[in-house]
């Protein structure tokens, strides 16, 4: 779907275009507060597939789909006059304001996460995803991972 369809009124669309538009809108990813980086990656794939490139349209669509609790976190930006880079600014601020801090990530990794029904390698990948671009070294991560494993995996 092109920008031109995005900017048309629904009354101007054919029944097929309306159906296509509504079906693709309903397939937008639901916002995941625990991983805004992944959510934005999915959203931007959607925008690319829909050939939406205009900052103004990206900004408008983002404002219309974020949950109310997220909108409250960036209320100042939503209520201000849009700038030429509104989408980019809003995206950056949502990421900054909602992403876990480095210390929160480490705390979550070493206190809240358990092996559960995952294999040790799945658990390590899970921890690496949670770490993201955190500056803690791989050695620290692996040491915490080993300590989180049951004794029979640690060779106690």
Image (tube, rainbow, N blue to C red):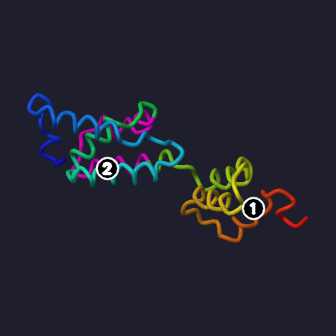
Residue located at (28% from left, 41% from top): 24
Tell me if 60 is positioned left or right of 154 in this view: left
Tell me if 20 is positioned left or right of 67 in this view: left
Tell me if 32 is positioned left or right of 101 in this view: left
Q: Earlier in the sequence, mark 1 or mark 2?
A: 2
Front-most of residues 44 and 70: 44
In this figure, which residue is indicated by the disc labeled 2? 46
Q: Are marks 1 and 2 in contact (CB under 8 Å)?
A: no
Q: Majority secondary structure of the magenta segment?
A: helix
Q: Which mark is residue 66?
A: none
C-alpha span from label 1 to label 2: 36 Å
What span is colored magenta in the figure? 70-94
Residue located at (73% from left, 61% from top): 145
Q: Residue furthest left?
A: 12
Mark 1 or 2, closer to the camera: 2
Q: Residue furthest right?
A: 156
In this figure, which residue is indicated by the disc labeled 1? 144
Tell me if 20 is positioned left or right of 131 in this view: left
Q: Residue furthest top?
A: 11
- 31 inside magenta stretch: no
Residue located at (28% from left, 50% from top): 47
Whole-percent x, y for residue 150 in the image: 83, 56
Mark 1 neighbour class, 10 Å CA radius: few under 14, some 14 to 19, many 20 or more: some
Quarter of the image for residue 68 reads top left
């Amino acid at each position: 779907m092109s920008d031109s369809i995005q900017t048309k009124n629904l009354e101007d669309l054919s029944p097929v275009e309306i159906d296509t538009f509504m079906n693709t809108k309903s397939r937008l990813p639901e916002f995941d507060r625990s991983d805004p980086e992944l959510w934005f990656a999915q959203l931007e794939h959607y925008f690319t597939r829909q050939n939406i490139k205009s900052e103004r349209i990206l900004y408008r669509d983002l404002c219309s789909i974020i949950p109310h609790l997220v909108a409250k976190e960036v209320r100042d930006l939503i209520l201000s006059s849009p700038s030429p880079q509104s989408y980019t600014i809003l995206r950056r601020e949502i990421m900054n304001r909602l992403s876990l801090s480095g210390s929160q990530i480490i705390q979550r990794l070493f206190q809240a996460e358990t092996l559960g029904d995952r294999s040790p390698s799945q658990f390590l990948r899970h921890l690496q995803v949670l770490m993201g671009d955190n500056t803690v070294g791989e050695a620290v991560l692996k040491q915490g991972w080993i300590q989180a494993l049951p004794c029979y995996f640690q060779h106690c």
